[in-house]
């Protein structure tokens, strides 16, 4: 059986709604996309539901389904997702929290939940927490994320996620720092709550006197002298794609959430400073890295572009058109550089982000799966309207994951 | 309400992918099929998912869904499927195994798992096992299948499927015959394991000295002096179609797997030596037998043709075209011989077997449901591309089962 490779471009927030200023077209319909059109014409097209029809999803859930998972089964909660985003490879025993560097006064009131949206120095602050040992040998892993955010993992067998958050969700001189409490009657929950409270106490001791905080106080800024915890969770036994299907998989991305999900499901991640996850990300460099991954022999390579989603959130159709045309330039490179007889090339998005809404919507997402051996829908214009009658319309992103693997000839057979 | 009858032709492995040597057409698109086109034009068409989009299925699962079942609920495992293939009508208490005639040396090493792929004499060998009584009155049923294969059923109340196989899966002078062990703590599993080990011992005693084996040894061939067991299962409470819907149902086929599934779900099976399940099966004789079944008054008659699947496995598009044109000849007979005003005629396949893949794929299967009173999609060209926009596209084979029964006016109402 012939060996094939797959390349999927995920254009975040790609789908849109008709825009009056565009004469009722969407940005994707208005954009000039000869290379997407080329690929669409050589395969299956459609508007694909990220999850359930009409239900908007976040970037995290949208990517889980693109990678073939049922989020109702495996969604691990925000703590683990941020841990993977920060580059912590969690094991099945670990529990993770979303952490905030925050400001406590001397009587343990939470004055600022974000330590004045601290922008620098969190690397150093996290470093004094990372590797701390708690009572009984539990290890703390701490890695900074953007601004005040920090991923916190506790590593030891026998921990429980049945514990309350220490983030009070509000701040002020009357708001006391909550103690972590067990949320069920188990010995594991009681012990985990004790460890979390020990963690909080150690944070205060190690952070308050830290040079970063001495400098902040000297400059009249609030100290980052505690870490508030919420969003506890564990990995819920997600089985990596590679192990499920005996494939090697790569993900080229700059966005931290996408990198986190990719690590959670076992994709090998590739990022560098040119992949910003922002509107000015270097898309040609991303395309070249993805082509490299295919050439290195990865069975399935995913490349993520954040731009269309940001333009949707900004209510900016003209910029969304520009970004989509830049993405078409990535497909031009794929068309030039890849062996199209043996590569399945696909486009989708994790959800729609209509400019008129300025947020994610449940509208299905324009999608194609293209290749020399793929059946053809005969639709060579890329857009929400033209894709409506394609074979993939009405299917879900999980279905499209399986269809890609089937076109790679690696989807296992059910029955004999 | 008018009484109607249904006739469904299952063309195994019918669907395909575009083939460059055919100018991007599939075998079904290239084949000249005026009679399929006639029926397609008088009904609903579409490309139908056998199970979940993108998931390839085996012949067994593919037929279970064509017959309206959810394989995730009722798939009984390979043992029962082979028992029904061999013609053993299992009851709900029975447990079944896939058996292999194999070669043991005097110190119980498994020298050959297939007794040299023994080709004759298994009828006589199975006969001395069939009807054996084990301790406590359990009865052994044994029926030969092709080559070294033999279906083994244990019949008694209170048996368990929680037992380990006695087939070591490898062979050689160092490989000992494994004892059957209980796989859970129940008394039923312990007792069933004891019965299986008693069966093994009785096999050895009755087979080794059998004339078939004396002849084999004289000819320098390995003895078939034991039966190795694996794939244990029971019927999982499949309720026959006929009982569910108060219908009489027939299945005309030569392929043993299809005959087994048909018996499992309670179809009356018709086969004779002209229906080989092979590429040279007498398709006109099969068509005539199916027409007979309709004339005899069966409410729903299924006729199975294996040929397209075999051509797909052989990467042979031109032969697949020829077989499809022969199948069109069956539809010519249906067109001449059946009362088309009162017969719903349908075509589907259990899965696609693309020639380029040489194996089953998850691609949806070209399907029509045709009759004087059926709504018309207005598509009178049979093929994957033309059927793409038909009403059945995107549905599953289970849906198409219900649609056929509904067109027969026998589908029970949900609600009042």
Image: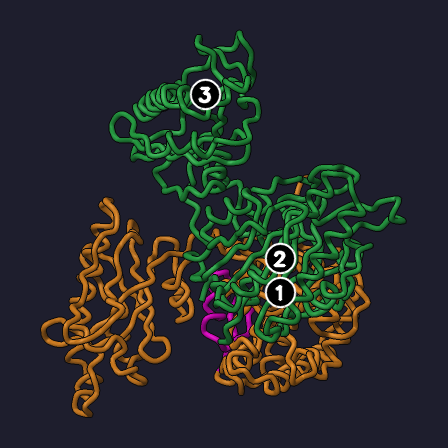
Chain colours: A green, B orange
Percent x, y of residue A206: 37, 23
Question: Label 1's element?
Answer: strand
| Vertical comparison of A93 with B309: above or below | above
C-alpha gap between disc 2 and disc 3? 46 Å
Q: Which residue is mark 3?
A: A214
The image position of residue B86, as x and y in percent, is 39, 71
Magenta region: which residues?
A: B250-272
Give the label, 1 or 3, closer to the camera. 3
Q: Earlier in the sequence, mark 1 or mark 3?
A: 3
Both on one chain, marks 1 and 3?
yes
Check the image and report above or below for B214 versus A192: below
Q: Which circle marks residue B19 in the picture?
A: none
Between disc 2 and disc 3, the foreground one is: 3
- Residue position for label 1: A345
Q: Residue furthest left?
A: B107
Are the residues flagged by discs 2 and 1 in contact, CB closer than 8 Å?
yes
Judged from the image, the secondary structure of the residue bearing numbered disc 2 is strand
């Amino acid at each position: 059986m012939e060996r094939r490779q797959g390349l999927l471009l995920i254009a975040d927030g790609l789908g849109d709604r008709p825009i009056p200023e565009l004469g009722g077209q969407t940005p994707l319909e208005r954009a000039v996309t000869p290379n997407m059109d080329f690929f669409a014409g050589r395969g299956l097209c459609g508007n694909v539901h990220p999850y359930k029809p009409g239900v908007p999803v976040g970037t995290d859930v949208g990517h889980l389904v693109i990678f073939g998972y049922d989020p109702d089964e495996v969604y691990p909660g925000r703590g683990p997702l941020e841990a993977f985003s920060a580059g912590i490879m969690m094991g099945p025993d670990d529990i993770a929290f979303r952490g905030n560097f925050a400001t406590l006064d001397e009587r343990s009131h939470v004055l600022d939940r974000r330590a004045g949206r601290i922008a620098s120095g969190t690397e150093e602050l996290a470093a004094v927490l990372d590797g701390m040992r708690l009572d009984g040998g539990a290890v703390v892993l701490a890695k900074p994320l953007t601004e005040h955010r920090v991923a916190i993992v506790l590593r030891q067998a026998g921990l429980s996620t049945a514990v309350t958050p220490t983030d009070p969700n509000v701040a002020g001189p009357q708001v006391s720092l909550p103690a972590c409490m067990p949320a069920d009657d188990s010995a594991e929950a009681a012990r985990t709550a004790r460890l979390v409270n020990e963690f909080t106490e150690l944070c205060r001791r190690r952070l308050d006197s830290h040079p970063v905080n001495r400098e902040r106080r000297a400059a009249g800024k609030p100290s980052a002298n505690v870490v508030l915890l919420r969003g506890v969770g564990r990995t819920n036994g997600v089985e990596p794609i590679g192990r499920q299907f005996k494939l090697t998989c790569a993900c080229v991305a700059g966005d931290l959430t996408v990198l986190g999900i990719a690590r959670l499901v076992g994709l090998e991640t590739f990022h560098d400073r040119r992949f910003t996850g922002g509107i000015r990300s270097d898309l040609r460099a991303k395309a070249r890295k993805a082509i490299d991954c295919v050439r290195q022999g990865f069975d399935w390579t995913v490349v993520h572009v954040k731009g269309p989603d940001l333009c949707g959130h900004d209510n900016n159709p003209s910029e969304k058109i520009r970004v989509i045309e830049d993405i078409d330039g990535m497909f031009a490179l794929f068309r030039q550089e890849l062996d199209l007889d043996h590569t399945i090339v696909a486009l989708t998005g994790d959800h729609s982000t209509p400019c008129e809404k300025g947020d994610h919507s449940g509208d299905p997402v324009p999608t194609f799966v293209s290749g020399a051996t793929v059946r053809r829908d005969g639709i060579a214009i890329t857009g929400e309207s033209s894709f409506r009658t394609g074979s993939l319309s009405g299917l879900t992103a999980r279905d499209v994951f399986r269809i890609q693997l089937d076109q790679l000839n690696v989807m296992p057979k059910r029955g004999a």
